[in-house]
Amino acid sequence: MNENHPATRPPDTDDGDTSAAGRTLTVADVLALPVLAAGQPQVVTGVPHLDRPVRWVHITELTDPASFLKGGELVLTTGMPLPDDAADVRRYVDELADVEAAALVIELVRRYHRPPEALVHACHARGLPLITLAKDVNFLEVTQVVHTLILGNQTDAMRRTQRIHEAFTALTLRGAGAEDVVRAASEMSGRTVVLENLAHQALICEPSGSTVEEALTDWERRSRATPPGDPSDVRGAERWLVTPVEYQGERWGRVAMLPARADGPSFGPEHLTVLQRTAMALTVARLIHPTPWERTAHRNALRDLAEQRHHSPEDARARCAALGLPTDDSRFLAILVDQGGAETEALLSRELRTAGIPTLVGELSPGRLGILLALRPSQPWRPVAERLGRAALDLVPLAVVSVGSEVTDLADTARSFREAARVAEATPPGRPLPPDRSFHELSDIGLSRLLYALREDTRIQEYTERQLGRLIDHDTRHGSDLLTTLRHYLDAAGNKTTAARRGGVSRETVYQRLRTIERLLNRDLESGEQRTELHIALTALDVLRAS
């Protein structure tokens, strides 16, 4: 039964200050102090409980010391008052355990030279740490040292608590959003902090000492296994510290602080203070920022996917899955809606929910909505895109709906968004849609739309001017319209008769004008390659003039 462990301090598992100063003092901390270590302490029972906090030290030679204790005391005794009867010894230990004394330290110098078996058995049965001292120790000096540390730590704790309150007050006064609040909570606590809604979707995650994947994998199941409750408390098998976020009886979600590791240290009073102030700051943020948390979460997730800002594909999958988007055995399609605002975003979100299509919807940039569809393997994407496009156009007739290509891996959605963006860039406002279609796609991009997308590139502008500049200058100076004749000729694929008919002039006039054009541009209009170059330049000119 006698465990006889040397009372050396075990490795500290906290991720903060590793000294006794600055945090709650434990039994292990006290045993490691020189003033007590000089007595050669041995842990006889209760090794797993050496992390118990020591709130005070009590020296006693009474047979009923428990009546003077409030819990958390390290009890020091010479052993002189211990009863001889085993039943009385059990009663003595039971009373100490019932008031939750931190540990019992007995000196083996005067009455005993080895701990009584009855005492060892009783302490082992109640899980009370029993420590023996082989050498004489000045108990008064122990109390002075430990009490000084405890009071100093309490003062430090008050200062740190004050800093926590000041930090969250500053966040609230400057109108910080929910992301800023959760990030500050994670930084102050050194723990991962997650804000979730009532549907157990993780809306904001600030990891600390772990990845997003580790924090959010299988989030909904783990969250549902962590029971709700009104007071802030440690709950569930994973020992999350959770507190609700609510206002005037209306609950919006809860914020959870995850332990550093599954076998790591529990939370302290400062963690609780941080979490409670986080909930208060989130309530204020919700009241002053009308945008729903879900919309902000979708927007941030979409931007990170489109711009590939995730640390890893695994982090991206975990984050999107925690928002309710299926990431396994799904196909993904990116859709952009230009000219869409908050009303369009809300409408399309409702439309997709009605259709039962898992999706993320959010603003990627001012006036541009991003949509990511998660489709079943057997589900065709065109009917969904058509329904979405029709809904957008019904609300905003001038909206431009562009679609990327379908991908099978969430990590490839950035490519789908890039393709949808290229389609949007190549689509002038008011561009007619193909028959029976409400969206534009890559296959729609021809020469004119490609040049429209490149219209701001100075190389296109220089090319157009080099090919046609002298002809345009001649028309301007002489009031002629040779540019139109060239257009008719090129549109007719070099057929002069057709060009004359389209221009409403004789063939002889067309011949004469074409010779003038060849002379001005130094071109051979019988050359197919040169006609192609001029046709491209004319198309680019039309695009530049229409921009």
Image (cartoon, rainbow, N blue to C red):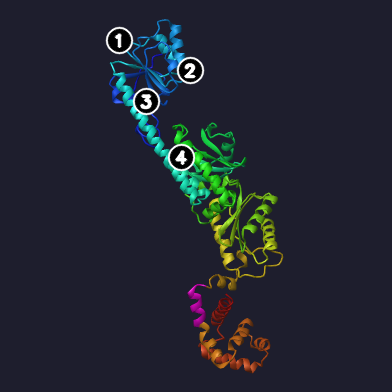
Residue placed most toward the observer, 416 or 510 = 416
Q: Nearer the viewer, mark 3 or mark 1?
A: 1
Where in the figure is residue 203, as x and y percent of width and height? 56, 46
Secondary structure mostly seen in magenta is: helix
At 32% from the left and 12% from the top, the residue drawn is: 108
Mark nearer the N terminus (2 vs 3)? 3
Can you see residue 15? Answer: no
Q: CA gap, disc 2 to disc 3?
A: 21 Å
Q: What amino acid type is highlighted by mark number 3?
A: Ala
Q: Is residue 353 left or right of residue 32?
A: right
Q: In this rendering, is residue 34 above or below 508? A: above
Q: CA gap, disc 4 to disc 3?
A: 24 Å
Quarter of the picture containing the C terminus is bottom right
Q: Nearer the viewer, mark 4 or mark 2?
A: 2
At 58% from the left and 40% from the top, the residue drawn is: 220
Q: Quadrant of residue 451?
A: bottom right
Is residue 494 in the magenta section? no
Where in the figure is residue 134, as x and y percent of width and height? 30, 15
Mark nearer the N terminus (4 vs 2)? 2
Task: State which region is magenta.
Answer: 456-466
Q: What amino acid type is highlighted by mark number 2?
A: Asp
- Residue position marked by numbered label 3 in the rendering: 28
Classify mark 3: helix, strand or loop: helix
Q: CA gap, disc 4 to disc 1?
A: 48 Å
- Residue position marked by numbered label 4 in the rendering: 191
At 51% from the left and 72% from the top, the residue drawn is: 456
- Residue position marked by numbered label 1 in the rendering: 110
- Residue position marked by numbered label 2 in the rendering: 98
Q: CA gap, disc 1 to disc 2?
A: 28 Å
Is residue 465 in the magenta section? yes
Q: What amino acid type is highlighted by mark number 1?
A: Arg
